[in-house]
Amino acid sequence: SAGFAGGEPFLAREAYRVWDLCEELRPGLDCTVVTNGTQWNARVERALEQVRVQPVISLDGITAATYEAIRPGADHARVLANLDRFCRYAARVGTQVNVNFCLMPQNAHELPDVLRYAEARGIHVNALTVLGPLACSLPQAPRDVLEATMRSWEREDGALAGQLTVNAVTW
């Protein structure tokens, strides 16, 4: 197996060169690709046929306002459409889509809705702790921010806990 992460693998020329080699030397190789989900085109589709990809989509907000504030220049609607494409691909080839949610003060309030969204699609969410920069680090956030986050999560806890199976551990 192989893993591709860092930057955007579907924009990296070297990743495509490696996938070409894999097709030649090890057809059907299992690969994990951590992507921001912004890319979907003929070149991506070809790569998905060269290797057997388990996509991991970085989704740092479920609303366009939050997502696009965290990822300037990214199109929230396009990313969600691509996430659905990756889900159809994974179902066809027998892999699984996962979501990485980088937990920050800027998006912590959306964690419950991200979990609901993913749960409805059978997608596991990895909630990742951001340590830096400090402005994006929930563990380093001021006490009032942490308390507000906890209060919002506590309000969601009863209802959300009963709605989750795939993401119960994440919650």
Image (tube, rainbow, N blue to C red):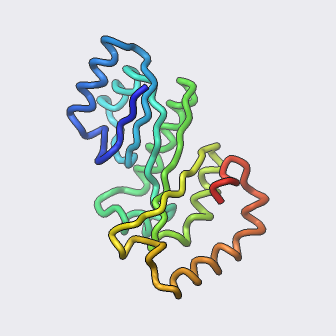
Comparing 29 with 121, the one in front is 29
Q: Quadrant of residue 171?
A: bottom right
Q: Is residue 98 above or below residue 105?
A: above
Q: Nearer the viewer, residue 146 or 73?
A: 146
Residue extending farthest left: 13
- Residue 29 at what x, y percent from top left? 42, 20
Residue that appears at 53% across and 57% down: 127
Quadrant of the drawing holding the N terminus: top left
Image position of 17 (left or right of 37) = left
Residue at x 60% of width, y 46% of height: 124
Check the image and report above or below for 75 versus 137: above
Locate residue 56, reporting x and y percent. 46, 42
Please name the residue shown 60% across and 44% down the image.
123
Q: Is residue 134 left or right of residue 159?
A: left
Q: Is residue 67 left or right of residue 17?
A: right
Give the residue at x 69% y 75%: 154
